[in-house]
Image (cartoon, rainbow, N blue to C red):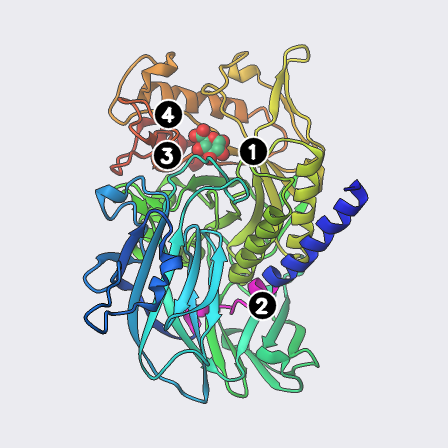
Amino acid sequence: MKSLTKQIIFGLALLIVFCIQDIQAQNLMTNVFGRHILSLNGKWSAMVDQYNQGYKMALYQNKKPQGKTDFFEYSFDGALQLNVPSDWNSQLPELKYYEGTIWYGRHFEGNVDNEKRQFLYFGAVSYRCRIFLNGKEIGSHEGGFTPFQIEITDKVKTGDNFIAVEVNNTRSKDAIPAMSFDWWNYGGITRDVMLVSTPNVYIREYSIQLDKYKPEKINAQVVLSDKKPNSNIGIEIPELNIKLKLRTDENGIASTSFTAKKIKRWSPDSPTLYTAIISSVSDRIEEKIGFRNLYVKGTNIYLNDKPIFLKCVSFHEEIPQRKGRAYSEADAAMLLTEAKALGCNMIRLAHYPQNEYTVRLAEKMGFILWQEIPIWQGIDFTDASTLIKAKSMLAEMITRDKNRCAVGFWGIANETQPSVERNKFLTTLLQTGKSMDTTRLFVAAFDLVRFNRDKKIFEMNDSFAAQLDVVAVNKYMGWYQPWPLDPKDAKWNVTPNKPLIISEFGGEALYGQSGDETVASSWSEDYQAKLYKDNITMFANIPNLRGVSPWILFDFRSPFRMHPANQEGWNRKGLVSDQGIRKKAWYIMHDYYLKIK
Ligand code: GCU
C-alpha cells in the first residue's frame, strides 16, 4: 500500500480513536471528593483467570445453578477475598509475581432517584479493565494510574446490584509503560472505588487558578453537564471577599477573570489554601484551592516572582514495609513526612500520576509537584494506538489535578531515545498538554548527557529538548558512569539558556552494609555516601542548575534487581531502606538541602 495512503489511514485512526478517548477523559468530573460519594472499598470476591476464560464464560453474569443439571465452573460466592484498594501482589504470596487476569466482584445496595445521576468512579485500575454491572458490560479503561468514571444512572437498580471488574496487568509492546520498567508490575484495583451521585444537571468541571504571571488575577472556568446554556453559576472565595455571579454560554461554560487583593500566595514555606465554593442552580461544590505564580525567565524558575532552587526527591507509589502500592492518606503521610524531614520543597512523583491523597496532602504540606505519565524508556513511538493512550493518560492526569496549585510540572517522558518518530510523538503530546494547561511547566527527563573527552565537558545533544520549558537529566555519575575526572573539575554545558534540573542521580547501598567507599560492588553505605558527596561537588559547577532530585527516597521493588545478596528484587538506591531506616547518604543530602536557602 502506498505510503501516502498509509499515512492518511494512520491520521484518520488517530483522529477517530483519540476523539473517543479524549471525550472520555474530558468528561471526568473535577474533585470527586467534593461530591456525594458512597465508598465501595473493602473486601471484594476474586477469581484468578490465568487463561482468560472468564469473559467467554460470561462469569460477570454471576449465574447460580438453577435445576439439577445446571453447573458453572466459577462462583464469586465463597471465592478468594481481596482488599480494594490494594494491588493483588502484596495480598497473597502466590500472587507476588502474578501477571494476568483476575476477576473482582461485589454486591452493593442501589437507590434509583429521578432527581439524581449516578456514576462509578475508579481512582485507578492496573493495568487494563472491563467493567460489568448486573451482568452487562458498561465500560473499559486502559492505563494503571489515572481515574475514570462510568455513568450508571439508567443501569443501577434499587436494591441489590452486582458489579464485576475484569483486571489484567499483562505487559504489552503497545502499552504505557511497555514491556519492561524498573518498578514492580502491580496489578489490581489499586485505588478507591466510589459510587458518586450528582443532580441531573451538575457542575462537571471547573478550574480556578492564579494567572501565570499576574499576582492578583484569577482565571476561572466552570462547565455544566449537558452543555446547559444560560444557567446561573456562582463562585465564592469568602476569605478574599469574592462573590461572583456568572451565566453559562451556549456550550454550558462560564468563564471569567477577576482580581483579588491581598492574596497570600501558596508556597512550600507558606502553603496557604482558600475555600472556594462553586455553585449552580442545582449543584454546589467546595474545596481548598491555592494561588501561586510559576514561570521561567531566562535560566531561572520563578515562584511568586522570586527565583527558586528545587530541593527535590522522587518516590514511587509504594510502601516498602508493606511491599505494596501506596493508596491511602496514611500512606501519603508516611512518604511525604520523610521527604519533609529530608528538607525538600519538591517531589517528583515517579514515574506515573500518583493517587489523589498524595497530591492533595503534598499541597497542604508545601511541596511543588512534578507529575508525569509513564512514557518510560522503550515505548513504541511508531504505534498510533500508543499515542492515543498517551494523550488520554495526559488528559486524565491534567483534568484530575488542574486545580492543584502544588502541581508545577507536567512530565511527558523519561529516558526516551532521539528519533524522528519519538520527536513527532512527544511534540504531539506536548501540544495536547499545552492545549489543556497553559499555567504549568512542561518537562521531560533525558539520559543523554555525555562527557566529551576532547572538550572535557558534559554536554547533551537532543533537538527535542528545546521545546520544553525546563530540561531535566538523569545522570548517574559514580554509578552507571565512573568519574572521568575529579568531580570538582566537572564542567557542564547542557541546554545553557534553559533551567536545568538533575532529575535523577545516586547509587545503590544495602542498608547496614559497610565497605570500601571507592568500590561500587561493595553495595555499601560508605560508597553511596561518597557518591553523594562527589555529585554535590559537581553540582556547584553547573551554571544553569535550578534543582536536583536524588533517585530515590526509599528502596523499591523491581524485577530488574536480581542480585541474591544485595538486591533480592529491590532497587537499593533509596536514601531510606525498605524497612524505613535512613542510610548515611540521607544525612549528606539533608545537610546539602539545609544549606540552600
Ligand atoms: C533510570 C530510571 C529509573 C530507574 C533508575 C535506576 O534513570 O529513570 O526509573 O529506577 O534509572 O536505574 O535505578
Which of label 1 and label 4 is nearer to you? 1
For disc 3, the marked residue is 558
Which comes before the other along the chain, label 3 or label 1?
A: 1
Dot label at residue 207: 2
Examine the structure image and report whether residue 258 is included in the region drawn in magenta. Answer: no
Amino acid at the residue labelled 4: Glu
> Considering only order in the chain, which callout, 2 or 1, is on the residue closer to the N terminus?
2
Q: Are marks 1 and 2 in contact (CB under 8 Å)?
A: no
Q: Residue drawn 57% across and 45% down?
A: 411
Q: Earlier in the sequence, mark 3 or mark 2?
A: 2
Q: Say whether disc 1 or disc 4 marks the residue closer to the N-terminus.
A: 1
What span is in magenta? 23-34
| Residue bearing the label numbered 4 | 508
Is label 3's Cβ within 8 Å of ligand 1? yes
Q: Is residue 437 left or right of residue 524?
A: right
Q: Position of residue 234 (x, y in %)?
A: 57, 82
